[in-house]
Image: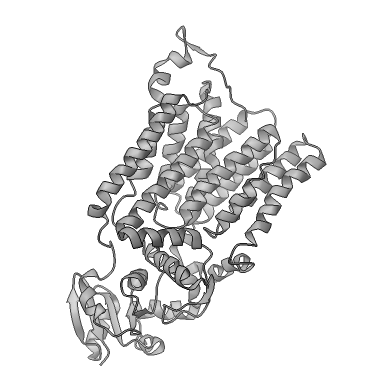
């Protein structure tokens, strides 16, 4: 979709550039960008973040990208470190500054996501429309801005979508997307989104019949070679089979469930798709690229909870351009004052994060922290029955212990997951789980249903109890 590039429209005898909106509108995107940097700041509460740090540390020590898991007591699948690049960065941050370092990386990553979406939208819309879309994307990402490698996917999805929309405008192949995909494939399992977006644009160009077959073939080389580049990461071809491990256990992973339509994140993402749809209905000719990308954005939004934000990001530049068409305002490139304001907002926000992180993120937001002393006194190699949420915390805080469950769900068999769920619920036969995994101790939330059963059995006396957790020993 094409947008104007010169401010020719007049409002009450003034050019749009002289209107009130133009005079203050440039401040809005920097304010929203500050929200991206500051809102995620807080204690590290994502259970995955802890084992990502452990993964980065183990990789730096061993150089192993595909390995038998040395940490869990009940894992039975190969651990493929297909997100190793951000995991190493998280380990460096943790080694240097502890959990505040991890919290800082979250805020930095969130800001980079915001900057990527801002750049993609601002190419096609004025500050007001850009700020609105940027805010809606933030709402759509509200459940996904956590210290995990998926932040790389969000940022690079915005960059890649914008790049392919530029290719739609000038028919130029952007070969730099190939090495970018290699970096993406070293960072997160959803690297394939980049080649998929490229393939969608090439198919759209073919349906529009405005390029010769040879030119289409040349453009198609970019996503094809991007996939080939992903095959030569340090993980090797195993990168392509790693998603199959998750496929068998998605029923037990909340983020792989279908999202609720009433969720504000879903509503925000769908509103962006709706804006694009309204624009497309007004066109006389079919804009196949926009149609296909909007359908892809809707599919990502409605299929899995973890891809709601991704759907919003893919729709964002199209929605920004559509808003410009609907409100009939011209677009100019970002003036120096706007770019400066965005840079100042980003730097000041990160400076505030640096100052505040030690106070607000110095302690973990999960795990039996009050039992650190008692857990630290257990012999190395002790197998501990635990709540899944606390598994990553145990791996990081007490590397000598071997938890029986954590959020690396793809490393566990379905049978083990089901046995763990029956154990935590205190269902009949719960006694078999500790015997099966070889637990000598159990550290569990006091509120877990099985705790009452364990106490009543007389075989699991409490050795320590504090802050809502109990440490029990098999007698």
Residue 373 in picture, x, y percent from top left: 21, 76
The image quadrant that residue 393 belongs to is: bottom left
* Above or below: residue 301 compared with residue 345: below
Q: Is residue 287 visible?
A: no
The image quadrant that residue 370 belongs to is: bottom left
Please report the residue visible at 56 percent of the width from the left and 25 percent of the height from the top.
325
Which of the pair 256/429 is nearer the observer?
A: 256
Residue 331 in picture, x, y percent from top left: 53, 23
Where, quadrant-wise, is the C terminus in this rendering? Answer: bottom left
Which of the pair 416/5 is nearer the observer?
A: 5
Residue 350 in picture, x, y percent from top left: 34, 44
Please report the residue visible at 50 percent of the width from the left and 36 percent of the height from the top.
119
Residue 186 in picture, x, y percent from top left: 55, 59
Where, quadrant-wise, is the N terminus in this rendering? Answer: top right
Its colouring scheme is: one colour
Which of the pair 422/109 is nearer the observer?
A: 109
């Amino acid at each position: 979709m094409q947008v104007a590039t010169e401010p020719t429209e007049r409002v009450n005898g003034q050019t749009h550039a002289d209107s009130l909106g133009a005079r203050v509108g440039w401040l809005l995107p920097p304010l929203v960008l500050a929200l991206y940097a500051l809102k995620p700041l807080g204690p590290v509460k994502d259970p995955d973040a802890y084992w990502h740090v452990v993964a980065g540390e183990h990789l730096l020590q061993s150089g192993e990208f595909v390995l038998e898991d040395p940490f869990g007591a009940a894992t039975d699948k190969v651990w493929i470190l297909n997100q190793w690049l951000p995991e190493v960065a998280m380990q460096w941050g943790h080694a240097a500054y502890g959990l505040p370092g991890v919290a800082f990386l979250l805020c930095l990553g969130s800001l980079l996501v915001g900057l990527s979406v801002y750049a993609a939208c601002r190419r096609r819309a004025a500050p007001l429309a850009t700020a609105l879309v940027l805010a809606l994307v933030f709402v759509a990402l509200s459940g996904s801005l956590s210290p995990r490698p998926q932040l790389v996917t969000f940022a690079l999805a915005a960059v890649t979508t914008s790049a392919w929309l530029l290719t739609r405008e000038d028919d130029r192949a952007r070969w730099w997307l190939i090495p970018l995909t290699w970096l993406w494939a070293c960072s997160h399992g959803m690297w394939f989104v980049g080649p998929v977006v490229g393939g969608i644009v090439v198919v759209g160009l073919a349906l529009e019949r405005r390029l010769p077959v040879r030119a289409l073939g040349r453009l198609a080389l970019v996503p094809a070679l991007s996939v080939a580049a992903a095959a030569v990461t340090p993980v090797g071809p195993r990168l392509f089979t790693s998603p199959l491990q998750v496929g068998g256990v998605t029923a037990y992973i909340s983020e792989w469930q279908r999202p609720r339509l009433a969720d504000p994140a879903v509503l925000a993402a769908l509103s962006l798709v709706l804006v694009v749809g309204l624009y497309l209905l007004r066109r006389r000719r079919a804009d196949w690229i926009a149609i296909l990308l909007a359908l892809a954005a809707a599919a990502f939004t409605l299929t899995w909870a973890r891809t709601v934000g991704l759907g919003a990001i893919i729709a964002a530049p199209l929605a920004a351009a559509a808003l410009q068409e609907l409100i009939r305002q011209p677009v100019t490139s970002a003036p120096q004052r706007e770019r400066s304001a965005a840079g100042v907002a980003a730097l000041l926000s990160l400076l505030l994060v640096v100052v505040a992180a030690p106070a607000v993120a110095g302690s973990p937001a999960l795990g039996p922290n009050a039992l650190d002393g008692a857990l630290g006194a257990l012999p190395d190699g002790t197998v501990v029955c635990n709540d899944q949420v606390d598994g990553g915390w145990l791996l990081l805080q007490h590397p000598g212990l071997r938890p029986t469950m954590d959020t690396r769900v793809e490393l566990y068999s379905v049978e083990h997951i089901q046995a763990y769920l029956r154990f935590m619920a205190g269902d009949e036969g719960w006694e078999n789980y500790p015997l099966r995994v070889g637990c000598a101790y159990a550290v569990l939330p006091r509120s877990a249903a099985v705790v009452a059963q364990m106490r009543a059995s007389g075989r699991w006396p409490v050795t320590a109890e504090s802050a809502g957790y109990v440490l029990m020993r098999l007698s």
